[in-house]
Image (cartoon, rainbow, N blue to C red):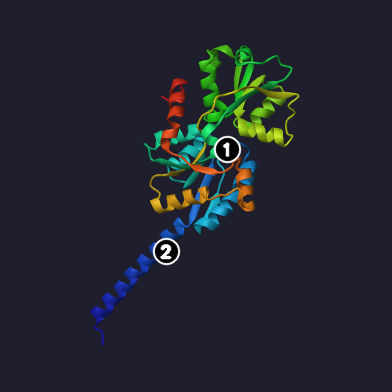
Amino acid sequence: MLHSQQLKNLFLSLLYFGVLAFSCLTNAQAQITLRVTTIPEEAATEQVRKFTPLATYLEKQLDMKVQFTPVTDYPAAVESLVNKKVDLVWFGGFTFVQANIRSGGKVVPLAQREEDTKFQSVFIAKTQSGIKSLADMKGKQVSFGSQSSTSGHLMPRSYLLQANIDPEKDFKRIAYSGAHDATIASVVSGKVDAAALDITVWQKFVTENKVNTQDVNVFFTTPPYYNYNWSVHADMPAQQREKIKAALLALNPANPEHAEILKLNRATRYVPTMPENYKGLESAARSAGLLQ
């Protein structure tokens, strides 16, 4: 027979282990959802269409729930990873640099599209506008994308400055559309005379006949630079980080299901990347006065 003190000790032990088990279960449940977001380079509906199949693929590969939630603007994507409100973010090169600086070097880029190793921006204008070069943009109304966009602002601004064109002094007006599709629309509608954007969004619009190149077309394409990547916070366990990276690198264009995901992501395949690849962007951002 157990004495009352022994019974009490047994009860307390069971209670302790019960609380411990519940705590572990709660923590496990918190960890079984991978929270994903992306910079809003296009409308939220387009982001959901592009990334939902990838989220479904990651669920299978990682054996965990994947929750994709669009954010309203580029700074929100940066803050959400810095503050660990999300686990995985599709950044542009410049937003990666911003997040890495904001976090004290605690943002880890896992993979980028093969296209991101030699990315480019395009400048577009109406074909009848008389704008045939960067110099022809002087005195005109010009649109960039988001102020935090690599391909829609930072790199186009960097190449304008290299061509001795100061947007603030030389353009009649500067607009920020917020997203690449809105940038194209601003030129088509005549709201601005010229604009700069991501080459892959432009190519997608041309391929899908969403823009008439007889009316609006490219007059300048930048030299190549490193751009987008999938990043995580350095506090994510290394094993989980490697699993996500392996899943992205395993996407194979020869597999029809994978090919569809890659097509939606405007990618031929994903390749490994590293922080050093984005040092050039950081230097360009400092030179352009976009980073203090």
Please name the residue that numbered disc 1 is placed on.
40
Looking at numbered disc 1 in the image, what kind of residue is underneath it?
Answer: Pro
Depth check, front residue: 100 or 22: 100
Depth check, front residue: 10 or 173: 173
Instruction: Residue 179 in the image: state x and y as whole percent.
Output: 61, 32
Instruction: Residue 275 in the image: state x and y as whole percent.
Output: 42, 36
Whether residue 190 is visible, yes or no, is yes
Which residue is located at x 44 percent, y 34 percent? 277
Q: Which residue lies furthest to the front in this view?
A: 254
Front disc: 2 or 1: 1
Which residue is located at x 72 percent, y 25 percent? 188
Quadrant for residue 135, please give it: top right
Which residue is located at x 60 percent, y 45 percent? 262
Q: Residues within 10 Å of mark 2 (few under 14, many from 20)?
A: few
Quadrant of the image for the C terminus?
A: top left
Q: Residues within 10 Å of mark 1 (few under 14, many from 20)?
A: many
Residue 56 is left or right of residue 205, and the answer is left
Q: What element carries label 2?
A: helix
Specify the label residue 119 is tagged with: none
Q: Is mark 1 on a helix, strand or loop?
A: loop
Spatial CA span between label 2 and label 1: 34 Å
Looking at numbered disc 2 in the image, what kind of residue is underneath it?
Answer: Leu
Instruction: Residue 2 in the image: state x and y as whole percent.
Output: 26, 84
Please name the residue that numbered disc 2 is placed on.
25
